Amino acid sequence: MIDFIKSQVLTEKTSKLLSQNKYTFDVDISLNKKDISKILEDLFGVKVLSVNSYILPGKKRRLGKFEGFKNNYKRVFVTVAPNNIIPYFSGL
């Protein structure tokens, strides 16, 4: 279950969103919003109010004469209930 969440995203924009109880994650591209909500509620014990997501496109990369693509991934913005926090972000 935790394998579906690839990483947390910490940028200037996402640190501003933390004050509004919005957390940002990169997740597996095959997950839908209901799956993401259920996984986060089970893992962190929080009440998820909404999930917004978008898929970032893969980019063309080149190393010498070899050409390929970076993988696509899905970024989600999760809004949790006002009295809930996700502990990994609470130190910010």
Image: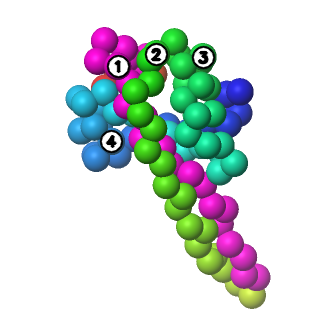
Q: Tag 2: Cα neighbours inside 10 Å, few (<14), some, or many (≥20)?
A: some
Q: Residue at x 55, y 25 (%)?
A: 40
Disc 3: which residue? 42
Judging by the rendered image, the residue that carries numbered circle 4 is 14
Magenta segment: 66-87
Apparent side of residue 61 relative to residue 20 in the rendered image (left or right) = right
Q: Amino acid at mark 2?
A: Val
**Does the CB distance between marks 2 and 1 fall below 8 Å?**
yes
Q: Amino acid at mark 4?
A: Thr
Q: Circle 4 sits in a helix, a strand or a loop, which is it?
A: helix
Q: In the image as oriented, which residue stretches furthest toward the bottom?
A: 65
Camera-side mark, 3 or 4: 3
Local packing at callout 4 (Cα closer than 10 Å; few below 14, some 14-19, many 20+) is some
Give the mark nearer the N terminus: 4 vs 1: 4
User: In the rendered structure, which disc, 2 or 1, sits on the residue that comes first in sequence?
Assistant: 2
Dot 1: element: loop
**Residue placed under numbered mark 1 in the picture:** 81
Q: Is residue 47 above or below residue 16?
A: above
